[in-house]
Image (cartoon, coloured by chain):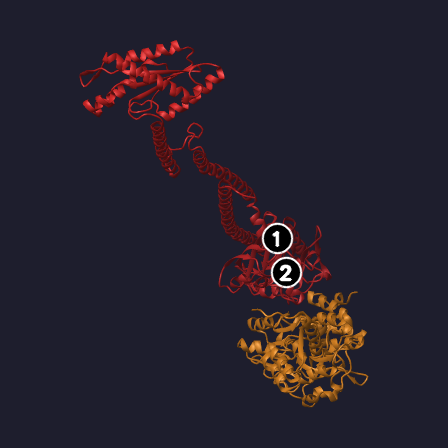
Amino acid sequence: MRFGIAARLGIVLALSGMLSAGITAFQAQRASETVLVDSARAELLTSTRVLAQRITQVREDISRTLLALARHPAALAALESDDPQAATQLATLLALPMAANRAYFQLRLIGAADHGLERVRIDRDGDALLRVDGDALQEKGHYPYVFDALALAAGEVYMSRVSINRERGSHAALGRPAVQLATPVVDESGRPRGVIVGSIDLNGVFALLAADLPADFLLYLANSAGDYLIHPDPARTFGFDKGRRVRVQDEFPATQAVIDGRSSESMIDSDAGEHAQAPLVAAFIAARVQLRTEEGAFILGLARPRAAVLAELDPLRGIMLQIVIGMSLTGILLAAILARAITHPIEVLGAAVQNFYDNGQAPALPVERQDEIGALARRFAELRTQIGQQLAELEHRRRELEHLARHDALTGLPNRALFDDRMAVALASARRDDGGLALLFVDIDDFKPINDRLGHVVGDRVLEGVAARIRQSIRESDTAARIGGDEFVVLLPGIASAEDARVVADKIRAAIDRPFMIDGEELAVSVSMGLAHYPQDGSDSTTLARHADAAMYRDKAEGKARRHS
Amino acid sequence: MLRRLSLHRLPWLVLALALSGTACATEVLRVLSWPGYADADVVQAFEARTGARVEVTQVDSDETLWQKLSTNDATDYDVFAVNTAELQRYIDRGVAVAIDPAALPNLGAQLPRFRDPATLPGTTRDGKLYAIPYAWAEMGLIYDRRQFDAPPQSIAALWDARYRGKVLVYNSGSHNFSLAAQMLGKASPFRLDAADWAPAVERLVELRRNLLTFYAQPEESAHLFVSRGAALMYANYGTQQLQLLRAAGADVGYAIPREGALAWLDCWVVTRGARNQALALAWIDHLLGTGPAHVLSARHGLDNTRDPAPHQAETDRLIWLEPVEDVERRNLLWERILSGDRGARVLAP
């Protein structure tokens, strides 16, 4: 398959158009991806900070509740007396925040005496609140939330480590991730007599806090050592409780700086290790706890699948695809137009070359263009003009040469060769039509003396004058020729009778007999003439010529006799 | 120009490769081990000496070890390490095979207490030797020298009211009931009779009331000991905790109580599926040598069976861990005690 310049040029232009559109779209998409991922990380970081603030608010709310309960006279009364009334009054108070806030697993008053025996205890049990009493109350003095909280001053709040609650009989809290907040109850002398302890449902709190996060956000919470407390995969939480560590820095190595305290936040593009298949964009911060606690900081993080982040590009991708297709089609169209614009003038030039001599058929050359094509067309037009002129000149010369070859240079009359041709044609025509013709010889009398006496120039003028008068005396269809120095012959085709020919001969003689004016002097010239008729005098040109010649010599002799008589 | 392998030579090449592969396969020893028991340099020394290749598979829990050896009829490994208490079910199942002591010249260099099967319950059965002691640690008492005039002599110190709120004990049902059994003067701390449960629970509730708290991790125990000014600690992790406390600047001592310290002992065992028993025994004998023994003590802080332990006398009594009479009952009752239940409620059905 062969492609013309237009097709090849069109393909190249269309391909380069498509390529440039594709590259532009690709680069734009990459740039957009970077911007999107960066902004997603920043958004995650902001969301994480907001979440940390909300956690702090929740914790402060709970702290305020515990402090209010610890300061309430009913708490001290329940510790100092064995009056069931006092305990019941506090139980009523403890039930209020638990009813209002599902984050509480338990609210308890625990005494410093009797090995930390629980005095008043409300447990959440399913949807109900349950007061645990009597023998079911347990000694909790060996738990840090008791012995560490008892060491606090009034108004301070203790927070335990986050762990799986293994305290048997704790109802809804059993086996669940929980954190204990506690504050001491002090008597008038400032001596700690017990603690108010709130057991908080970690997952419950976070489910509430994270409820308005977008569905594809993944929530991570780890303790200060990096052990997961909350993870999208619940099986990976509280690994230390099962004898194996599952840590955030193992899944997201970049969080090590946050855990070491070298950095307060970490924005991560996690696409290695377990995230190689489904990369995540994530942000982690260290959330310090402003409480008496062994826990130190929590590592809080939010992540989104990178694919979900980039899904926001989908509409843009569609538009880009349309642009690429549109630009490609435009490129193809432009390429076609451009190719046509370039090849059309070439075709015109080609046609012009093909029809070089046929000026009427060739399309107009685009000489008016101000570009390379125009220059080429102008050069070509010049060339064509030059060649045309030279050809015309050659033709002229040729015609001239041809004329010279068949005419007498001095008089312009046909020479012998042309005359013979015409004679042959006229004879053939007469034979065919059964018509007649006449041959008339005309010879200038005493031409040599004129030439000798008056010079060749005058002789030539005489010859010219005779030729002109013969031509004026004959029909258009007759032929007069000069066949010798002073000899002329006239072919009269279509002459029916000798009379007609005689009339013509007389007319010629009369014309020549008028004196010639040469250089202001009159000169008389006479001619002798001989006629021959076809078919009467001969049927071929030689015979006719001989007859006419003889007739002319007779006339000359007669004429000489007339002049000398 | 490239020279091409002519095709008619290819079958010979394949055959040669196959033969060399077979030759190599006979010299592979498949070791199922714990972290620190088969370090790269120890393995390389063995490979250099025997010309065999060693494939080490690490496990980090008794459950994983059991799972690997109870599948495929124990044919996936030649030799493995296990503690004496766990060992019994491997003997029961027939995974472990008897060992000829004569094949282990380095046995003669072991401390006397590891040479006498009578003091090592569990390594023999029906007069046959099944396990070679390798690494061990005991659970002694760590005390604050400033709060003790003399080292504690008995585990009764844990119950001493003078140290109320200053005692730390490991959070473990099995071990703590063994501790209670020792307090009750039982012959074996691992065998509680029906009548023993109530007094044992009573002892443990008393223990709970006397201590500050229970710990789980060595680092946690050292932190609690220093930050809360503790006086006495039952050291489940033994000298590892001692090292941590001394590193933290605590003035602490280490004592083996006269009732005896519970101790775990890891042994090497040859599997029924061993392809080359002689090679497996050569591996065990290699580990009993001075080099590997030194690596165990100096690099990993575990006691080896050649050198006397630095923190105890040869006469100190060690009680090697054995399977207890009822793990689930101990754990259930322990959870109730830990949760703060009182007296009769702990023993409720």
Mark on residue A205?
Answer: 1
A312 or B53: nearer the eye?
Answer: B53
**In front of the other: label 2 or label 1?**
1
Q: Look at the numbered disc 1 and give the secondary structure of its residue.
A: helix
Question: In the rendered structure, which amino acid carries the disc numbered 1?
Answer: Val
Question: In the rendered structure, which amino acid carries the disc numbered 2?
Answer: Leu
- Chain A's colour? red
A411 or B229: nearer the eye?
Answer: A411
- Residue located farthest toward the left when viewing the structure as drawn: A520
Q: Residues within 10 Å of mark 1 (few under 14, many from 20)?
A: some
- Chain B's colour? orange
The mark nearer the N terminus, 2 or 1, is 2
The residue wearing badge 2 is A79
x and y percentages locating residue A432 in the rendered image: 49, 17
Query: Which quadrant of the view contains residue B54?
Result: bottom right
B202 or A86: nearer the eye?
Answer: B202
x and y percentages locating residue A118 in the rendered image: 67, 61
x and y percentages locating residue A3 in the rendered image: 53, 42
Mark on residue B227?
Answer: none
Q: Look at the numbered disc 2 and give the secondary structure of its residue.
A: helix
